[in-house]
Amino acid sequence: MRATALRTIALVGLVSGPAMAQNRAVTIAVLPFEDRGSYGQDKDVFRGLALGIPATLIRELSGHPELRLADRNQVAQALKGENLGPNARVDAATAARVGKQVGARYAVTGNFADFYGRFRLDARIVETETGEIAKVVSNNDPALQDRASLYRIIQMVAHGVLQETTNGAARPGNAEGENIPTDALSQYSLGLLYESQGEGSKAGEHYQRALSAMPGYRDAREGIQRVRGR
């Protein structure tokens, strides 16, 4: 399980794209998220979302000139040195050590829970110098707790992380822009899960299903290209 989590970090990094680095850029390391107990779907879906949520969070954070995302390989190596338990849970102290090792000012980790369609997502922003949790960003708005709005939930949390880590300097993306359907996001997450387990054929099937649900889903298309070697 730990090896899978480390491969997850590498996969998450692949979908992030390079963040624009400037002298004032703040470096952030995005670490694994944990399923805190979810019900109502197949367990593999939730295992997949443990990969798909941080991948999508990185997707939302990438490209901002105020931010730089820590190198995925360095993050994976730092996590490996922590000898995490079988559930790969990352507490604040661990997040701080890993983030500091890869040169990040902040480390972002968290958890999620899905109770038959009612979705809760918490992202903990950890200051690597002090090990303290600077803020927890959550989808507290009752109007944004439906699993059908999963991408909007992740997007809102990403915007909160962005504003907190740049002291409001960075502008969040357009909330009325692209929307990834939950079915597409779930299938993409399953693709990440099977790819992390070395099951390229099954991963490709789920990436293709994600593309069928959303033909313009760039990350799913890139996933297919990875597992097919082109």
Image (cartoon, rainbow, N blue to C red):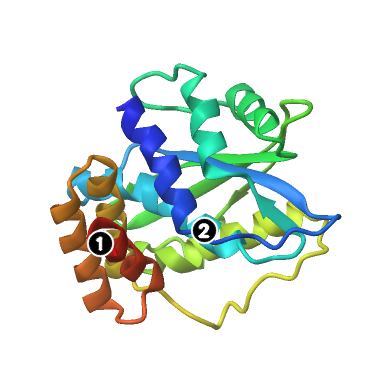
Q: Which mark is residue 16?
A: 2
Calculate the distance from the C-alpha at mark 1 to the C-alpha at mark 2: 18 Å
Q: Residue at x 73, y 29 (%)?
A: 132
Residue lying at 70% horizontally and 39% vertically, measured from the top left: 104
Which residue is found at the position 33% from the left and 37% from the top?
Answer: 37
Is residue 54 in view? no
Pick the residue in front: 163 or 142: 163
Q: Is residue 124 above or below residue 117?
A: above
Residue 154 in sight in this render = yes
- Kindly identify which numbered label has been placed on residue 187: 1
Discs 1/2, front: 2
Q: Give the residue type that dot 1 points to.
A: Gln
Q: Is residue 220 above or below residue 45?
A: below
Give the amino acid type for the residue marked by disc 2 in the picture: Ser
Q: Is residue 212 left or right of residue 152?
A: left
Compared to residue 35, the image places residue 78 above or below, namely above
Q: In the orientation shown, which residue stands out farthest toward the front? A: 230
- Mark 1 lies on a secondary structure that is helix
Q: In this image, 167 relative to 112: left or right? A: right
Classify residue 33 as left or right of residue 102: left
Q: Quadrant of the N terminus?
A: top left
The residue at the point 55 percent across, 39 percent down is: 109
Res 55 → quadrant: bottom left
Instruction: Say which quadrant the C terminus sits in.
Output: bottom left
Q: Position of residue 35 (x, y in %)?
A: 37, 39
- Is residue 73 found left or right of 210 in the rendered image? right
Mark 1–mark 2 contact, CB under 8 Å? no
Q: Residues within 10 Å of mark 1 (few under 14, many from 20)?
A: many
Closer-to-camera residue (228/184):
228
Disc marking residue 142: none
| Residue 78, position as x, y percentages in the image | 55, 27
